[in-house]
Image (cartoon, rainbow, N blue to C red):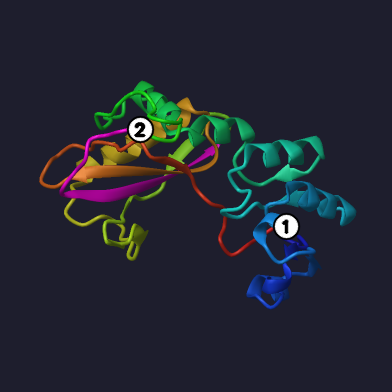
Amino acid sequence: MDIRTLVIYSELDRYLAHVTAADSAVALEGKTPTKTYLRGDLIIATAKSQNVEAIIPGYRFLSENANFAVQCEASGICSIGPIQEQIRQIGLKLIAYEAAAVADLLLLPHSGLPLINDGVYLERSFDDARHIEVQIFGDGHGHVIALNERDCSLQRRNQKLVEKTPPPNISDDVRARLRDAAVRLGTLLSLHYRLRIHLLMEQLRDHHPVNGILELAPGVRSLQI
């Protein structure tokens, strides 16, 4: 593609693979994330000083920070990630619930109101369920596609160990319905970028309750800003 890459790094990350593989690299002063990778102003200033045209936020850190997306736009730098409107829209799970309901997804019974703060709410618990994910991509103009769904049920301490596609023991009809539901939601949101939809499926049931956990999927994990 004839695109030159530049990465930033903290002192502790000096010898990581992405730093040595990039065309050029710029060190940020500091060793902690709060002094380096979470400093949106510092990252923008570094990008402008190096005539950077686009930033890939990667994952974690500022990848789902709406203010950073706004900073990039105001600085004339393209942020290759979710736009700030959708970060705000999907970041609050109860708002995501509302969008999923409008898209006619079957949701788990939940409290409907936050408890203590906006990030805490109650929903029905499943003793025996499968964790299925669907990845969707959108161009921001109403065109949304779904990639094959995958079974992520095998976990340890809430961390996925194995992801398998296609999910075993799920009929083609149910799989198609999962993808259709995901595309409906992405279309409703005018999705720009990528979204990972987490679903819970009760064992031995031929329907797909959705747990309403919608996450802005991280960018290409082999690249970092």
Q: Quadrant of residue 220?
A: bottom right
**Which residue is nearer to you in this view: 205 or 212?**
212
Circle 2: element type = loop
Disc 2 marks a residue whose amino acid type is Tyr
Q: Left of 203 or right of it: where is 152? A: right
Disc 1 marks a residue whose amino acid type is Lys
- What secondary structure do most residues of the magenta stretch adopt? strand
Q: Residue at x 45, y 40 (%)?
A: 145
Q: Is residue 16 magenta?
A: no
Which residue has dot 1 on it? 35
Percent across and percent down for residue 174 are 22, 41
Percent across and percent down for residue 188 are 46, 25
Q: Quadrant of residue 205?
A: top left
Percent across and percent down for residue 199 are 30, 42
Which residue has dot 2 on it? 121
Circle 1: element type = helix
| Residue range (magenta) | 122-139
Q: Is residue 101 above or below residue 20?
A: above
